[in-house]
Amino acid sequence: MQLVESSRVHWPHTPTTPSASPLSLVPATNMDHSTNWTNSDAGGLCWVSDPTQAYIEAVFKGISGNIATIETIQGQTMEIDIQAPLASPSRKQKEPPRRLLQRVPVESISLNGVEDMDNLPSLHEASILSNVDLRFRMDKIYTNSGPILIAMNPFKWLPIYGEEVIKSYHNRPYGSQAPHCFMEAEDAYQQLIKTQLNQAVVICGESGAGKTETTKLMLQYLSVISKRYEGGSAADGMTMGEKIVESNPLMEAFGNAKTLRNNNSSRFGKFTALHYSPQHTITGCHITNLLLEKARIVHQAEGERNFHIFYQLQAGAAAKYGLNGGATSQEYTKVCTTVSDMNDTEEYGLTVKSMKAVDIADAEIDSVMKIVAGVLQLGNVKFTNSDNSAVDGASSGALNAAAGMLGVSASKLQHALVHRVREIAGEAPVASPNNQEQSVHLRDATSKSVYSKLFDWLVTRINMTLDVDSASNPKFIGILDIFGFEDMRVNGFEQLFINTTNEMLQKVFNDIIFKKEEEEYNREQIVWDKTVFPDNDPCIHMLTKRPIGLLPYLDSECQRGMAASEGEALVRKFNQSHGNHKFYEVCGPASVWRRKDGKRTQNEDFLVHHFAGPIIYTVSDFIDKNRDALYGHVHDVLSESTNPLVASLYPQRTEEDNVASSKMTVGNRFLGQLQQLVGMLRASETRFVRCIKTNETFSPSVVDKTSVLRQLVCSGVMAALEVRRAGFPSRMLFTEFVREFRCFSGKPPYPSNDKDLTAKMMKHPSVAGRVTEAQYRLGTTKLFMQADVLYTLQSIKNKAIEPYVRRLQRWWIKNQGQIQQHKLKRGTYMIVRLTEKAKTEGVHHVAFVQKILAAADAARLTAAGNLNRDNVSALLDLCETAEANVDKAVQQKAEAYRIRAEILGVLDGFSARVEAVKAEAATLYNPEAKALLTSECDAAEMALTACREEQTAAANAWDQAVMADTGEQTGGLRRAATRANLYASASKIKIGNASAQEQAATRDGRMAEAKSMVPPLEELSTRLLEEKRLMDAARAQYANAIDQAADRLETIPVEQFIMFGITNVSDAVAEARMGIDQAHKMLNSIDPEGFKAAVKYAAEAVEVAVGSAVHESARVQAMADLDEGAKVLLEAVALATIEGIQTLPDFERAIEASQASITVARDRCMIPSVEDLQASVEEALSAVERAWDVYQHNFVAKRRAARDKFNAVKNMWEGKANDNPEVPSANRRASGSGKALFKVKAAAMPELPTAAEKGQLFKREQKAPVFSAAAPSSLPDVSGLSGGGAAEVEPIPAAEFHTHVDGEGRVLEDVTDADRASDMEYVAKMAEAGSLGEWIDANGLSSYKEQICSYAAELHDLVEMTDEDVDELISESAMPKLAGRRLKKAISELAGAQVSRPVGDSNLGVSENAPGIAMEPPQYVLEELNEAPPAPTEEEYEADYAAAAAVAPPAAPSPYSFADDTPSSVADAAPAFDATEEPVAATGISSKFSDAAKVIVVNDDFTKYVETVGSDGDTAIGYRNTGPKPFSLTIDFGASTNTMVKEHEGNATPSDLRVTQVVQPNGMMVVVVGAADLAAGTYQYKMSMEGESL
């Protein structure tokens, strides 16, 4: 199986969240086995995880706290946090923490490694990987892991599959021989005989792991064994088993292809069931094929081939079938045409031979090849590009050739390809022309249909020959060769079905290996250390369960005809059905998931969390591929074929056929076959072979440890081994145990039942001394034993019965009457056995072995010719010597292999280091540095490769003679090219004419020289990478500076300036944008000075544009303000004229001065200095205000004079009336009536308005785009950098790029940081918050500290979190709603300090500043004149009055007079809006409360705030609605005698002692209560929500 590199940490059986970060290529397992390093002594051996070599050997040096210090065998010292791997992974981690594991050298147990990893003393990932690595390098490619056989692909031929090896495994007990695929086949055969139950072998692994070869080897073994019991050959010279073996080339030719991962990859699944007779011989075979990859017929990825038969036919019989021009000229085969070590001409001959072996007649072979040629020719047919497409004239020859090979009419075929016909039941067919794309699609669909039907026919035809067992339900041994998990660059329809198959097989594996273990322990009532088993049931249900599993859903869509959803629409339906499923992820541009090429996923993508890892699928043509139905009119054309085979593939259609074909989809057939296959596996005794692909380069003796470890974990090997190790893997029924080990039963009396007897037998003195009670358990029906107990019992039994066996042997020999004859037979047997052993072990070509075996054979002949004691004794002596010599040769070979394994392991370690350096070299920017490092890597790589070849060649010398003997035997190499390469490799052992010792010394010297080249490489790489890091840091800082400059530029409202007819701003902005674009391009340069200059130019251009915008904004606003001032002057003159005071000298002087100031200010609008311009404007407006004040003073003085005159006249009349009765009284009453004829009141004394009453004199509305900008950011220094960078990057003083810009955008001078104020609010707030932990505690989130810390390493990480990230954190932490809101509020407040706002009113239209840029208050924002000038003093009033009274005549009241009920200006009449004041009904927390307020969380819907306010110690009490619905709140102070509400906020309805308010969601009710009142009284509150009391 293959684990896909994911964007995240995950268990192989547990789906993960989309926000997790990729920490490791290897998912975690239950194998933690952490060691308590605290008590460890320095010098202990350990393993440390490594990203490139999986695990490397190290020595423990010491520990301080949680930090362990270790030293690797490469001399590198590391500090490892031993607790880090145990903590929950953080989304901020970029790589997984290193693990530290105990190391017990495998060599201490066995120099050849451990054959069954149940026996490893230390069981964890590192020890398992080390064991299989050691054995693989010694060419021991098979290792047992409990019931699983691990097969490592050696990518070379090994002499372990010959006849002698087959003999050595036959009739041997399971486990008595070294692990081998033959041992699994033999065990299946023996169990079939013993239990009469069907047997199955599931061979799994990723592409290129060796599944197909393993299948062929097991079939070969079973065929050879069966042949021994058949008593002769079949009539045609071939047995049934041999026919089965010979059918493999045929199946491979039509079903295998070259892929990027495997040169002979099976593109279909195959279950081969070998039928057995009661006499245990093969009587037949049935092959079931699964899901041929039909898409490969018409399209192949770059570097991949079509099915082998297309190339074999063109190489072996091109002329016969009209295929000219070679594979490159054919549309379906031109992508890739050759495969290394594969001769297509030779392979074609083997394919034809294989077809004949399964009784396919010559005429049928010819028909098959014609169909293959017809498919190739059909792919060459082209169509015109039009709505009514037709066959292109240039490809008419291809059309005729295709029609000829398929035996159909060319004209009918042409018409069928360029038309589509809709067939509706009960109606006539409707034909319509195709466009070019539709015609190509129909052509390809026809090709796929023809080839897939041909493949099915071949399987059926093979079964006709092989499946001849007459029994209705014969016993079988089934071998399943199935494709592994696939994760291609683009995963489509085929990959979904392939991976669904693997998911189902993984379920079978889990059930058999894991759940059956648990079930048996529970059934037998055995107490054991239980382990959590992986379970992929939910994933399988999501894929296959009706009605909304992905595959059934796809079938249901196919039934909708033309309305079926495809692509994005189909994925939307998947998302709706499974969007919340834990094994399904919604993809799209906004998701976190990325395709294999790193691009964002699209809306037609979805993700499934398979057991092997997350895989993204792209929905394209799923409906058409699932229907897999050829248009009826094309079917009809093919059914008329003169080629009998084609006609049989496409029989005449009937109405029933049409209905059945519409319902039968690929998904239906596939799920049916899959369920049937799974049922057979569950009904059989199933064993598993896990094939491991050792490297991606197909190189012999090379191990990619990270890839191997990934495959071991994801295939379930690690978990299975852990389960069995924790329990008792060996078990026997009590009856079988008693029968097998009766010798331990002792003396009578015997217990009445087998369980008690077994217990007694296990306490036999011979057993109890070597097997403790902790090593076994008694179940209800079985005896459970640890891994080594059964072997120990066998040893004890053999030793116990040995005297009796010898006695029987002596009795038998005595009865023979010919002791010397027996000895002669024994010697002969020994010679045969030693000869077979020598061949099996590959040492029969060793000179001293050959010599002693020849001498022993000569002695045998002598003794046979002259049978006497001396000759027989000499024979037996030579046999014993021969046995010792054979054993010695085997030991020497094993030692040589072991030494080679160690050397190759070391070389591979150095090669991995070189590869790592080479990968780092590819990332360098400086071409010279890259070339230097790459050339040094190449040199070291060549030296290491040469050493590897020498060591491999030296080892191959052992196998050279074996290759000569077994290369042509059954099971040997099929391709001579590979054999020739191995001979060439073996010949490299000779180094001149030197002796063996000299050759070894030369090799060792070369290897030491090659190894010495690596450390300097790493030092050079480290130095160059540091330079690159500095360059990257500088680029990142400069890129950030460019982004900040671009953000500053975006704050300029260019469109508004254009609307005002101001073009120089837009020109400056365009120039700045060009500078920014050029700076971005220059950042890819390796010249630091170049991109520094480009960035500086861009920054200066931005400042020019900003300065221009500032100046133009200020200039236009100044003109508008001056126009407003001029209007005020005209009004003042007009009013003064009405009052007749316009000629007063002080008024005239004030008017003249104001007009002069306005003129001067207008003239200064063109000066570059914004500050001077604004000062001139303020001065002019102040002069206008002074003139207005003079007018007001003169007006008041005139009114006072008029009042005094009126009062004087009134008093005069009053006096005269009193003195002379004839003078009418001012009160004028009717004579005698007492009623006043009129009433005279004294004139009111006019008063000057106060400063508050005057209000705002000038409207000063915004007349231009008001623009403000912060100070520019500083740029980093790149001094000393070259190419990759050579010096540490330190920011230079900000003054270097802080510039003062004039009104025209010119840079006047450089200024220092002191010239501009920095916005330090964000930094201060971060410092105030403290560490992340302190911040969590301060905000009442301590209960969730672990979860928050797993998401963020520091406070700044929280600021960067999006709303989705916060929601995900709340969900994963299982926070209640209130805690979640508190977290969101705290993060929002923390992030709120990041951006400072410019000063001034909020309604000035200032553009928002770019986020993340610290802004300082601008110096040039015009302040509103909200305050009137101070009123004149009383002395000034009197002086003005006196002067005005002397000259001003009385006048009528002015309509502009400042009476109490008349506004002094428009500004006074309209209510002013203060942007800093919150509306009364604003939601959220009231401004009454600060951060120091006491917060009381009452429940999820209600939070209370209390804080002392004001100087009197009053208390503000707030009630905030944090729930989703409004509630009614009544606060009742009725229990108090003197408590009163002093103040309230919101829409409350207060009474003396009660306040009632409806509080909306996120709203707040606030009351302020006096301190004394609150202390003396009590209060209560009542809340209700929608009538329900809270």
Image: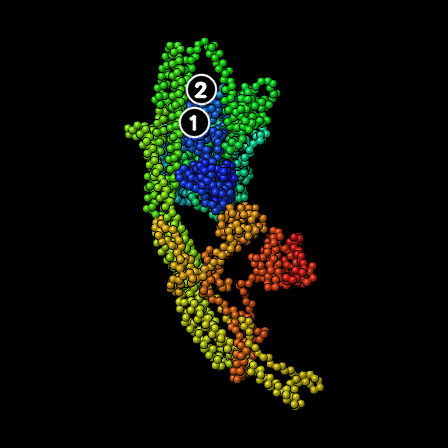
Residue 362 image offset from top left, x and y in percent? 39, 26
Residue located at (53% from left, 79% from top): 1435
Location of residue 1455 in the rendering, given as x and y in whole percent from the top left corner: 55, 77
Which one is nearer the viewer's eye here, 425 or 570? 570
> Viewer-proximal residue, 531 or 604?
531
Lower position in the chain sequence, tag 2 or tag 1: 1
Residue that appears at 61% across and 87% down? 1212
Kind of residue sitting beneath label 2: Arg
| Element at label 2 | helix
Q: Residue shown at 43%/64% (left/top)? A: 1110
Marker disc for residue 217: 1
Farthest residue to the left: give it: 993
Count neighbours of disc 2 (C-alpha within 10 A) and say few if under 14, some if 14 to 19, many if 20 or more.
few
The image shows residue 110, relative to residue 615, as above or below, that is above
Give the labeled residue for mark 2.
Answer: 228
Indicate the amino acid at tag 1: Leu
Residue 798: percent from left, percent from top: 50, 20
